Image: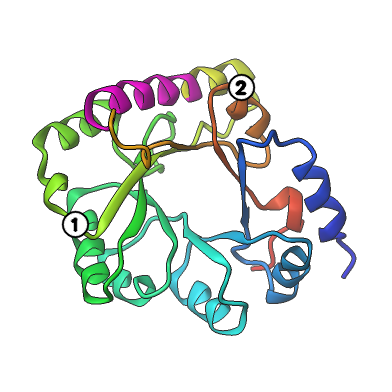
Amino acid sequence: MDYDVRKHLIEVRNTLPEHVRLVAISKYHPVECIEIAYKEGQRVFGESHEQELSRKYECLPKDIEWHFIGHLQTNKVKYIAPYISMIESVDSLKLLKEINKHAEKHGRVIDVLLELHIAEEATKFGFTPDACRKFLDDGEWRDLRNVRICGLMAMASFVDDNERIRSEFSVAEALFHEIKEKYFAADDAFCERSWGMSDDYMIAMECGSTMVRIGTTIFGPRVY
């Protein structure tokens, strides 16, 4: 393997303060790359396709924490519900209810993040800030006992404008604190701010990120 996964993983880790967790985004990368990172102590990996994730889950150590980071269709939830550690991309009440249903079947409580749409690209999924407020105000989520809302996830626009990126992450950070105070003040589990990827995670950490999702910098170009 030409790309030195171990070297780049260590370099990324050295840039992270203690309170920021690394989710190594392993989608489209072979099992061998994950094994190298695993040997270096990395335990949290992110995938965005159910079939690829299921294949990797079957052949890799079971103490890995798998995060689902992509748009999740409701009909795929049942396949990952037995083992997924966190679903970072909840963008509707319908999806949250489906996760709750399958988590209950397996006697589990699945951690989730609410996905925000803060970027200007129309292709991004997620709640707008106002839609997120309405979702929480409506309160149906409170009746779902087999999911635990642990925070927010967001992606900034894919641009070279650092100030625009910082502005978008700042919107997410402000909304996190607003939601925390209004709905989750007594809930210690609501603490995660998952924003920041390979190109913008340093800015994201300036804007309160507690979890960064880094793939290309660690694993190199994707293998499609």
Q: Examine the structure image and report whether residue 172 is included in the region drawn in magenta.
A: yes
Q: Nearer the viewer, residue 220 or 207?
A: 207
Is any part of residue 114 visible from this angle? no
For the point 63% across and 25% down, which residue is it? 203
Alpha-carbon distance for marks 2 and 1? 34 Å
* Residue at 78% over, 61% down: 40
From the viewer's perspective, tell me whether residue 97 is left or right of residue 150: left
Magenta stretch mostly in which secondary structure?
helix
- Work out whether 111 lies above or below 123: below
Task: Say what amino acid the circle numbered 2 marks.
Answer: Glu
Quadrant of the image containing the N terminus: bottom right
Judge whether 18 appears above or below 78 on screen: above
Q: Which residues are magenta?
A: 169-184
Disc 2 secondary structure class: helix
> Which mark, residue 206?
2
Q: Amino acid at mark 1?
A: Arg
Say which quarter of the image contains residue 186. Answer: top left
Residue at which label 1 appears? 145
Q: Nearer the viewer, mark 2 or mark 1?
A: 1
Image check: 17 left or right of 140? right
First-in-chain label (2 vs 1): 1
Q: Is residue 21 visible?
A: yes
**According to the image, what is the colour scheme of the structure?**
rainbow
Q: Residue reaching furthest bottom?
A: 59
Callout 1 crowding tier (Cα within 10 Å): few <14, some 14–19, many ≥20? some
Asked if the stretch drawn in magenta spans residue 7, the answer is: no
Q: Is residue 95 placed above or below 121 in the rendered structure?
A: below
Quadrant (top left/top right/bottom left/bottom right) for the C terminus: bottom right
